């Protein structure tokens, strides 16, 4: 019983000067809740070998709880993994212009859905129609919150209760365990599979078309490759067949490439402009993959179809907000102005020559007075260009406990995410943005000195 008497009351702690400061900083209500939780934990420990803590220790524990509760759970990290589109680390970082655009529209009222010329209500999609037309060659376009939503909306609006034909080789699983087949089922379209896992022929599609068929869906193998004994009709062939039969061709490109990836030593990734030119009625693609912008699903194509989709009720649930549209507009402007490689972070990373990366790795090794610079490989990631790599140079640290080092780096004030390669801790400069590079070296020094 005497142990319980040593536990201070909530009122007594609230009167302590340090706690008064916590009340001012965090509010009385939240501070009282923290006190109650800490005191509850202490009561549970009574009778154990741990003695009652002093008031100073209790107040420190209360402060720690308050700081933990109010700290942002989403924070910036340094990506030193060499994976450019790292899904777990937020995929594509935005360009400076895109970030400024987001800040601009969120710090004030804006004309999101207001026509300044007429003084009447406008559409939020009007802000991007011209850009999407100029860049992709499509008649018009609209934006939703991600590419899975784009495919879902298109199929629901145009193929609900009708047949949608897709090759078995294209029934891909995307991130988080979601599958194209699941999206199609949710849309209400009646999925018709044709061909085999590795081979599908034009006549397979032709034989499957009947009066209940509304669309052919082509889903790009964005996150895997089928090699060996394979065949698929070209997009042009599918477009010709679809239009001959009076149905629609929907091309789900996924990655959203607007630049020719072969220019950077990578294999060819189908481009949105190519799909439009080859006759797809609608093309769906992501905003935060190879396009290098915010998370978004973009649909471009025939004006009449786009307008029909815009009026579909599901569009209301999937529409993007002002932040997404502002960032996407700024990103698309980089393409329109021919400056994507200079301004969009992922394209700057992809286009950086290995010789420049080696210089950065050497400068880190020199500053640290440790480590070895070795040849390595960067990957694109984000379900884009599977198995494609870019030559790079890594700062490699030979540590006795590599797992311990990478764990401690993740707990730095600005967490550093590295990789372990052949038992060494490796840092790839390709994916380290210029601004936090100094903090990377500082973080490594700090952790290594503690080991």
Image (cartoon, rainbow, N blue to C red):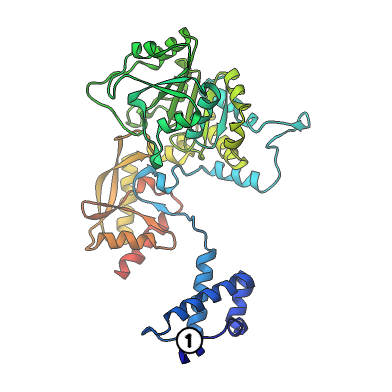
Q: Name the one closer to the observer, 170 or 378.
A: 170
User: Hey, which residue is sitting farthest bottom in the picture?
Assistant: 2
Total residue callouts: 1
Residue 261 position by quadrant: top left
Residue in the picture at 40% in, 63% down:
412
Residue in the picture at 41% in, 86% down:
51
Residue 249 to residue 410: above or below: above
Q: In terms of secondary structure, where does tag 1 sit?
A: loop
**Left or right: residue 145 compared with residue 183:** right
Residue 52 at x, y percent in the picture: 44, 86
User: Hey, which residue is sitting farthest top in the picture?
Assistant: 244
Residue 308 to residue 379: above or below: above
Residue 37 at x, y percent in the picture: 52, 74
Q: Label 1, on which residue?
A: 54
**Is residue 369 in view from this perspective?**
no
Residue 437 at x, y percent in the picture: 41, 54
Residue 45 to residue 275: above or below: below
**Is residue 223 in view from this perspective?**
yes
Q: Quadrant of the C terminus?
A: bottom left
Residue in the picture at 53% in, 36% down:
331
């Amino acid at each position: 019983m005497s142990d319980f008497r040593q536990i201070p009351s909530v009122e007594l702690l609230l009167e302590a000067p340090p706690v008064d400061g916590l009340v001012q900083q965090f509010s009385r209500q939240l501070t009282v809740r923290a006190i109650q939780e800490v005191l509850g934990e202490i009561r549970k420990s009574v009778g154990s070998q741990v003695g009652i803590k002093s008031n100073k220790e209790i107040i420190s524990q209360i402060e720690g709880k308050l700081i933990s509760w109010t700290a942002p759970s989403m924070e910036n990290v340094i990506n030193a993994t060499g994976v450019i589109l790292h899904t777990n680390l937020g995929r594509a970082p935005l360009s400076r212009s895109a970030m400024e655009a987001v800040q601009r529209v969120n710090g004030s009222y804006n004309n999101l859905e207001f026509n300044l010329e007429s003084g009447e209500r406008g559409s939020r999609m009007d802000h991007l129609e011209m850009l999407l037309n100029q860049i992709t060659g499509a008649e018009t376009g609209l934006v939703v919150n991600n590419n899975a939503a784009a495919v879902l909306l298109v199929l629901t609006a145009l193929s609900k209760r009708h047949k949608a034909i897709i090759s078995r080789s294209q029934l891909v699983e995307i991130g988080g365990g979601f599958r194209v087949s699941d999206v199609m089922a949710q849309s209400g379209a009646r999925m018709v599979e044709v061909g085999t896992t590795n081979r599908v022929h034009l006549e397979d599609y032709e034989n499957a078309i009947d009066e209940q068929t509304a669309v052919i869906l082509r889903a790009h193998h964005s996150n895997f490759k089928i090699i060996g004994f394979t065949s698929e009709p070209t997009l042009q062939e599918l477009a010709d067949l679809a239009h001959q039969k009076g149905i629609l061709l929907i091309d789900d490109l996924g990655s959203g490439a607007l630049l020719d990836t072969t220019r950077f030593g990578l294999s060819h990734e189908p481009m949105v402009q190519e799909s439009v030119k080859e006759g797809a009625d609608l093309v769906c693609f992501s905003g935060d993959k190879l396009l290098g912008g915010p998370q978004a699903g973009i649909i471009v194509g025939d004006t009449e179809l786009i307008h029909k989709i815009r009026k579909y009720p599901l569009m209301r649930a999937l529409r993007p907000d002002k932040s997404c549209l502002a960032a996407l507009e700024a990103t698309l402007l980089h393409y329109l102005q021919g400056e994507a490689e200079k301004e969009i972070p992922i394209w700057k990373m992809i286009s950086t020559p290995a010789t420049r990366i080696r210089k950065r790795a050497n400068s880190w090794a020199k500053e640290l007075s440790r480590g070895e610079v070795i040849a390595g490989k960067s990957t694109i990631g984000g379900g884009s260009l599977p198995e494609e790599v870019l030559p790079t140079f890594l700062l490699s640290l030979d540590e006795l406990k590599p797992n311990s080092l990478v764990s401690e780096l993740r707990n730095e004030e600005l967490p550093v995410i590295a990789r372990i390669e052949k038992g060494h801790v490796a840092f790839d400069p390709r994916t380290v943005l210029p601004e936090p590079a100094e903090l990377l070296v500082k973080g490594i020094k700090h952790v290594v000195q503690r080991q």
